[in-house]
Image (tube, rainbow, N blue to C red):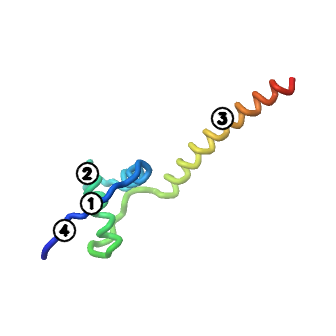
Amino acid sequence: MSSKVISFRFSDAEIQALEAFQTEEDGDSLNQTAARLLRSILGTSPPMSTGVDMDKLVEEKIAVAVGSLQAKLELVEERLGKLNA
C-alpha cells in the first residue's frame, strides 16, 4: 500500500482548535492529532474519544468573550456618565 504526504496551513484559531483535540497518544504532535482526526472522519480508523467536552469548551469561550464585552460596556457607560455630568 502506498502513501502520500499531504501538507496544508492552519490559521492560529484552527491550530488552537486542533490543540483542543490532542490526546496523550498524540503527544505534542499536532500532525498526529490532525492525522488521527482525519482518519476517524474518513472511516479508515475506529472512532476515538477526543477526551474533549465540547459543550464545556464552547461555554468557556463564550464566558471569556462575554466577560471582555462586559468590561468594555462598563467602560463606555462610565465615560458616558462623565460626559453627561
Under mark 3, the amino acid is Ala
Q: Is residue 23 above or below residue 80?
A: below
In the picture of the structure, the residue carrying the numbered disc 3 is 71
Under mark 1, the amino acid is Ser
**Of label 1 and label 2, which has the lower sequence position?**
1
Q: What secondary structure is marked by label 3?
A: helix
In the picture of the structure, the residue carrying the numbered disc 1 is 7
Label 4 Cα crowd, 10 Å radius (few <14 / some 14-19 / many 20+): few
Q: Residue at x 26, y 48 (%)?
A: 28
- Between circles 4 and 3, the one closer to the viewer is 4
Q: Residue at x 71, y 33 (%)?
A: 74
- Gap between marks 2 and 3, in whole Å? 36 Å
Q: What secondary structure is marked by label 4?
A: loop
Q: Residue at x 49, y 52 (%)?
A: 57
- Between circles 1 and 2, the one closer to the viewer is 1
Residue 80 x, y percent position in the rendering: 79, 30
In the picture of the structure, the residue carrying the numbered disc 2 is 29
Residue 76 x, y percent position in the rendering: 73, 33
**Of label 2 and label 4, which has the lower sequence position?**
4
Residue 40 x, y percent position in the rendering: 32, 70
Farthest left residue?
A: 1
**Of label 4 and label 3, which has the lower sequence position?**
4
**Of label 3 and label 1, which has the lower sequence position?**
1
In the picture of the structure, the residue carrying the numbered disc 4 is 4
Under mark 2, the amino acid is Ser
Left or right, residue 21 beside residue 58? left
> Could you say which is closer to the camera, residue 6 or residue 48?
6
- Gap between marks 2 and 4, in whole Å? 19 Å
- Gap between marks 4 and 3, in whole Å? 50 Å
- Between circles 3 and 1, the one closer to the viewer is 1
- Gap between marks 3 and 1, in whole Å? 41 Å
- The quadrant of the picture occupied by the C terminus is top right
